[in-house]
Image (cartoon, rainbow, N blue to C red):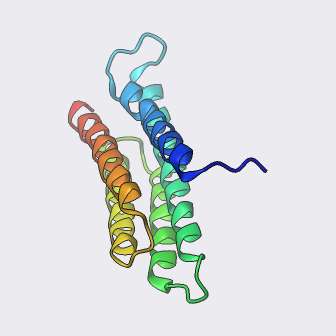
Amino acid sequence: MLIMSTALSRPLTRSLTYAGALPFLILMVPGLPFFDAAARLSAFLAYGAVIAGFMAGTLWGLVQRDDEVPVAPLIASNVLALAAWASLLLSPGEIALAVQFCAFLGLLAVDRHLAGQGLEQSWYWQLRLRITGIVCLAYAVRIVLG
């Protein structure tokens, strides 16, 4: 297993996090030459569901570190991941986008709660705040532009 110091893992985490936002930013741009509008929206929603599920899973890792596990973040993360997945069962459009938008805000709220309990490092909370802002901006643009 490859292990790295915190001094190296923080920049890597930041880089991977921002790289993970690139598909949202690319797919929010109208008129991409290699996607028609419907494919672009479907790809955006599919990627959003995957990332929301991934982010929900990271919350499980945070709360499992101690012997006493807070139940609310576990339940909330599952509900939010399922909401993001369920959005894929809706007709692709503003409602599906809004459901995922709310899921990302909900995940951020759970992260904030965990940060307040000292279960997240402050630099990670700041990163989550910035990246969620970027992702939610991409959702807002998609909702407005259709």
Please tell me whether residue 144 is drawn above or below residue 81 in the rendered image: above
Q: Position of residue 82 (x, y in %)?
A: 51, 63
Q: Position of residue 124 (x, y in %)?
A: 41, 56
Residue 101 left/right relative to 54: left
Res 22 quadrant in image: top left
Residue at the image position 49 percent from the left and 85 percent from the top: 70
Please tell me whether residue 47 is drawn above or below residue 95 in the rendered image: above
Q: Which residue, as the protein is rendered here, is positioned at the far bottom?
A: 68
Most foreground residue, 91 or 125: 125
Please tell me whether residue 81 is drawn above or below residue 24 in the rendered image: below
Most foreground residue, 73 or 65: 65
Residue at the image position 24 percent from the left and 41 percent from the top: 140
Residue 144 left/right relative to 38: left
Q: Which residue, as the protein is rendered here, is positioned at the far top?
A: 33
Most foreground residue, 137 or 30: 137
The image quadrant where one finds the C terminus is top left
Res 33 quadrant in image: top left
Residue at the image position 44 percent from the left and 27 percent from the top: 40
Residue at the image position 41 percent from the left and 41 percent from the top: 92
Q: Is residue 117 visible?
A: yes
Q: Position of residue 34 (x, y in %)?
A: 49, 13
Q: Position of residue 52 (x, y in %)?
A: 48, 54
Q: Which residue, as the protein is rendered here, is positioned at the far right?
A: 1
Q: Is residue 42 visible?
A: no
